[in-house]
Structures are given as C-alpha cells and as structure tokens.
Amino acid sequence: MVSANGLHAARARGRNTRQLVYELLRTRIVGLELRPGAALSENDLAAELGVSRTPVRESLILLGEEGLVDVYPQLGTFVSRIRPQAVVSAQFVREALELAALRDGVAQAGERDVLELRALLAGQAEADRRGDPETFFRLDEEFHARLMAVGGHGDAWSVVGHAKAHLDRARRLSLPLEDRIPLLVQQHTDVVDALERGDAGGAETALRGHLRQVFADVETIRDRHPELFGGDDTAPPRRQPRTKEHR
Amino acid sequence: MVSANGLHAARARGRNTRQLVYELLRTRIVGLELRPGAALSENDLAAELGVSRTPVRESLILLGEEGLVDVYPQLGTFVSRIRPQAVVSAQFVREALELAALRDGVAQAGERDVLELRALLAGQAEADRRGDPETFFRLDEEFHARLMAVGGHGDAWSVVGHAKAHLDRARRLSLPLEDRIPLLVQQHTDVVDALERGDAGGAETALRGHLRQVFADVETIRDRHPELFGGDDTAPPRRQPRTKEHR
DNA sequence: TCTGACGTACTTGTATGGTAGCCGACGAAC
DNA sequence: GTTCGTCGGCTACCATACAAGTACGTCAGA
C-alpha cells in the first residue's frame, strides 16, 4: 500500500501523480477507510498528500465517473453512499459476464489453467487459516479474473471490476461473518471441480450460486450497517461544520 | 448537435464546460469526424472551442479511460485506432449483457413494452426510406437500450454503451452497405416478435444472430478501411509536421 | 551524400490564481 | 417567537503559468 508520504517516492516508477492519487483514493474508498458520506475537499486532500489540486481534482472526476464519489459543483465532493439499485445493477453485470465467460472457459480449459486456479484456492484457504481477510480479498479478485481469462475474456475483467466496486464496499464487512471465508472457498472449489470435469452446466450452477451468495451477504450487511447505504434519491449530504480544534 | 460556437451558450443549461467538451469530442470521434490516428492537441482544441486547457484536458482523460484516445505523456494525444482485440472484447460484453437482459425481459414484457419497441421499429424503417442513417443509428441505440430496460436492466445499458463505442466507429461505415439497414430492422423485428410470443429461446437466438451480424460487418469494414484499424501493439503514432499555411 | 549532434517548437503534467455559486449562521424586522 | 435578508466562508470550476520531456528540422562534419 502506498502511504501519503511515500507518494512522491513512487512517482519515479512510470506512473504519474494522478494515477497514484487515484489508486490511493480508490483503495481507501473500497476498503471503507473513507466511509460513505465523508467529505473529500480538493484542497484538503492536496495538502494532505503534498501535491497540487490538479491531480487530486482529476482523480475525483474519474472516481465520480465510477460512481464512487458524488461531485456537487460549488458544494463539495463526497464518498457516495452505497445505492441499492447500483448494487443490483452491478450484480447483474457481474453475473452476466462471469457466467458467459465461464461457458467459453469450460470448453477451452487446459490442465495448466486448472492448476493455476487450484493454486489460488490453496492460497485462499491459507489466508483463511491465518485470519487474513485482506489477502483473501486479493486472491478472490485474482481467482475470478483468472476464471474469465480461461475463456479468453480476460480483457472484460476490467468491466466487472468497475461494476464490482459497489459490491465490494459492502463485502468487506461481510467477510468477518461466521465461517464466511471457508464457505466461499468451497464454492470456488466446486466451480473448479466442475470445470475440470468439463461439466458446463455444473460449473455454471456453482458459479451462479456463489455470486448470488455474495449478493445475499450484501443484504445482510445492509441490515447491520444502514448508515453506509443511501436511498435512490440524489439529495446532497450536509456539509460538516468545521470545528475549531482542527488546525 | 452542439457547434463549437454555441458551446458557451449551452453552458447556461446545467451542464458544465467539461461535459460539453466531452460530449462534443466523443460525438466527433464515434462519428468518425475525427479519424483514428488524428492528433488532438489540448492547446489547439482549447483555442478552437474558446475555452481553457483545463476542461479540454479533463475530457481527454475521460476519453482515454474509455479507450477512445491514447495519451502519450510529453508526446501527444491521438484518436485511438480501432484495435481488433478491443472489438472482440466489446462484442463479448455486449452479447453477454444484452442476452442476459433479454432472458429476463421475455418473462416480464408487457403489452406497453412491445408497443414502444414496435414504434421504434417503425421509426427505423422510416429512417431507411428517407435514407437517413444518422437517425437510424440513434433509433438503433434506443431500441437496444429499451430492450434491456424491459428486463429491468436499463441501468446496465451504460456499460454496454461504453463497450459499444469501439464497435460503433466501424459500424458507421457499414450502414451504407447494400440493403444493410433493412436487414437490421428485420432482425430487430424478429426479436420483438419472439418477445411478444413469450418465446425465450427464439428471442435469444434472434438477438444473438443480430449481434453477430453487426460483428461480422465490422470485419468487412476492416478489409475496406484498414487505415482505421491498428495492430494490438501500442506504438505511438508519428507527430504531424506543422505546415506554414495554417494561421 | 550520409551521419550525428543540437536547438527549437511542440507536447502533456503539475501548480496556482481568480470566479461564481451554495450553505449556514447571525441579526434585524415583524 | 418567527421569518427574512445579509454576510462570511467554503466549494468546485475554469484560466493561466511554469516545468519536464519528446521529436523533428537544421546544420556541421566526414
């Protein structure tokens, strides 16, 4: 993870400031370090990160396109609340693309593909034993990405990744649920088993069940953390009155 | 359509300069008014549109995210050539999403939905008779968007729209093909007919055939206009030597 | 004629200044 | 006590200035 202080040091390696700021903010938002509803001032962020407003502003525009922040001109920029409708839409996109890719994947999967997927499964089980949900999260991403790549549709993963952002913010909170990770690993395993057998129907059923499980978990989180979710209206949040103690 | 001169006049109605510039450039790129490979200088565009570099630059960043322009730092920004791999990927995304939405649509379609779709079909036939491919293009977009909305997945249309951009640039040139539009309208009609009958399998087959037809047309265009297409390498184009006669 | 160094003109990236508009608190008028 | 106008402070938006880097045309030299 790139800290705010290490931002300039990382600049040397090819990526420009905008991309670094974008990735930093996106990580913080998806990881719920920045909670839905939080205000994101261009000025404050620029000062905090030690860069000018320009790359910060450009990053916020990109995050706005993804729906991760809401920009209200002359009012402020805020981390978006999770909109139930956006979650439903994201689930549809994800399911449609991953299942379509899997159908092609079953036909094309080779021995090497199965081995790579099983290696990821082992890593996930290991992450569970260590009680390391962050690593599980990363390997989960990689698993689903590889699964699409097997069918020759690795390029389309970025589309899923975009849609998935809205799901992921809620999912983070679902992982600590009782025995959640072992269940997810088992579901992943079922998919790979069917894939190895060349069982298209079984693979599809297993993956659909898995994705719907994830979707259901989001609903559970919605009951427990309603403050992260917003209605489907577009009412701008209230600006936080500035306390005197901060600088 | 917003002309360069009318840009400031339109600013009054809610949208800011960045959005106007973005829409203008996107329209010109997808409509092939700006050809693949063309250089897009931030300075030149700003001068031409009578705005500063900032909104132009921000628009180019967004277009870069969509893959419609390639930004090479300290070198230039160019309208991207149509990458065959991107077309294949876009086709996959489109097909997966539209077909999944259609499966839900057949179950939920009401009389009103069918009437609206048929109205669009009539408009498309009319546009064909008038020899007005631009109007057909617009109504084609609307048809596919409505078709997804029938299944309750109107929100996901924007994802298709993003992916479709790469297909559309080539499609523009395919419409003048002999009797192309009547064929497309017939295929649209087949889908609606099956939808009205509640024939899920028939609707899916018809829509898949239609989308593959569009995809095949792109290949035809690729043969006739290879200059619009690029390899899958990322070699930056050459900068155009500046002639003295300009300004 | 060909080759290579170099200056110049262009590019995008970043920083900073100025503007219009919105919110919320405060105070006067009723 | 309630309502309305005003004012201060904040916001994002746009414009502009500066910095870093690339490519191409020119010209000297072999």
Image (cartoon, coloured by chain):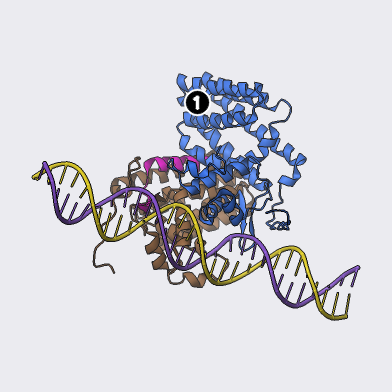
Chain colours: A brown, B blue, C purple, D yellow
Q: Is residue B88 above or below residue B247?
A: above
Which residue: 61% across, 51% down? B69
> Would residue A198 be visible to someone looking at this image?
no
Q: Is residue B113 above or below residue A94?
A: above
> Would residue B78 be visible to someone looking at this image?
yes
Given the image, on which type of amino acid does mark 1 rest?
Val
Q: Is residue A153 left or right of residue A222?
A: right
Q: Is residue A43 left or right of residue A225?
A: right
Magenta segment: does it hold A92? yes
Q: Which residues are magenta?
A: A72-96
Screen quadrant of the N terminus of chain B: top right
> x%, y% of residue B150?
47, 28
What secondary structure is marked by label 1? helix
Magenta segment: does it hold B174? no
How many numbered marks are there?
Answer: 1
Q: Nearer the viewer, residue A231 or B224?
A: B224
* Category of crowding for the residue at label 1, using alpha-carbon neighbours closer than 10 angstroms: few (below 14), some (14–19), many (at least 20): many
Screen quadrant of the C terminus of chain B: bottom right
Q: Nearer the viewer, residue A239 or B154?
A: A239
> x%, y% of residue A7?
47, 69
Chain letter for mark 1: B
Q: Is residue B107 left or right of residue B85?
A: left
Q: Nearer the viewer, residue B40 or A240?
A: B40
Q: Is residue B221 above or below residue A60?
A: above
Q: Is residue C23 above or below residue C12?
A: above
Q: Which residue is mark 1?
A: B106
Which residue: 58% across, 30% down? B140
> x%, y% of residue B67?
60, 50
> x%, y% of residue C1?
91, 68
